[in-house]
Image (cartoon, rainbow, N blue to C red):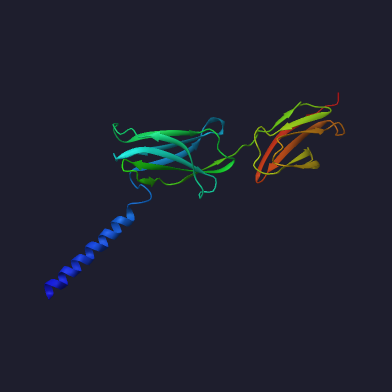
Amino acid sequence: MKKVYLLLMLAALMFSFSEKSTAQSPGSLPGLVTISADIAAGNKVVVSWTMLAKVNTDLFDVEKSSDGINWRSIATVKSENDTIVPFTYTSLDMSPLKGSNFYKVRLKDMNGNFTSTAIKRVWVNASGSINIFPNPSSNLINISLGQVAHANWSISIINDLGQIIEYKKYNKNITAVKLAVNNYPAGNYTVEVIEDNFKQSNRLLINHN
């Protein structure tokens, strides 16, 4: 009877260990892959990940999200299985969103199974991208966002005393507008564009000479 009891205890311990091992296998790759994401020139984002140990890897799928919940693939990189470790891979996001950008890398092994790295967040600030011409101006100015708006936006023209002398709202489908400035006194002004929570500004000189 004592032997039967010991066998049952051993079986229970083995089952418990098996459950814990299985629970740890999906998900992230602790100790195998490190990931980083940084802003490069022109507000592009460089995603890099380093393999710290050799694994049975087929490819890497670089994924991007604006909220950390919904993901889409932006690049697929074939694994260099013959290289020595550590080995670093890179992928470039040419068109990050304004604001938060989340990145992760999914590793696909030779059996078709996927595991994921940690998630990295990059904040992209598109400040200074608006274009005003002609500048200086005496009559009309053209204001261009330089990119597609993601939300409805507004323009404020502010004088050197900090007073808003004109304020207009626009639909997100509009990316360029004309404004008359012939009635404003000559001087320096700030043109401020606000789109959602993002603020961009540029200087404007009005000269009637």
Q: How many marks?
A: 0
Tell me where residue 132 sits by quadrant: top right
Specify the farthest residue to the front: 112
Q: Residue at x 37, y 45 (%)?
A: 114
Specify the farthest residue to the right: 183
Q: Residue at x 83, y 32 (%)?
A: 181
Tell me where residue 48 sits by quadrant: top left
Camera-side residue: 34 or 12? 12
Camera-side residue: 88 or 1? 1
Q: Quadrant of the N terminus?
A: bottom left
Q: Is 70 left or right of 154, judged from the image as shown? A: left
Q: Is 22 left or right of 202, judged from the image as shown? A: left
Q: Quadrant of the C terminus?
A: top right
Q: Is residue 25 above or below residue 185?
A: below
The x and y percentages for residue 166 are 81, 40
The x and y percentages for residue 86 are 32, 36
Camera-side residue: 56 or 41? 56
Q: Residue at x 70, y 39 (%)?
A: 173
Specify the farthest residue to the top: 209
The x and y percentages for residue 39 are 52, 36
The x and y percentages for residue 94 are 53, 32
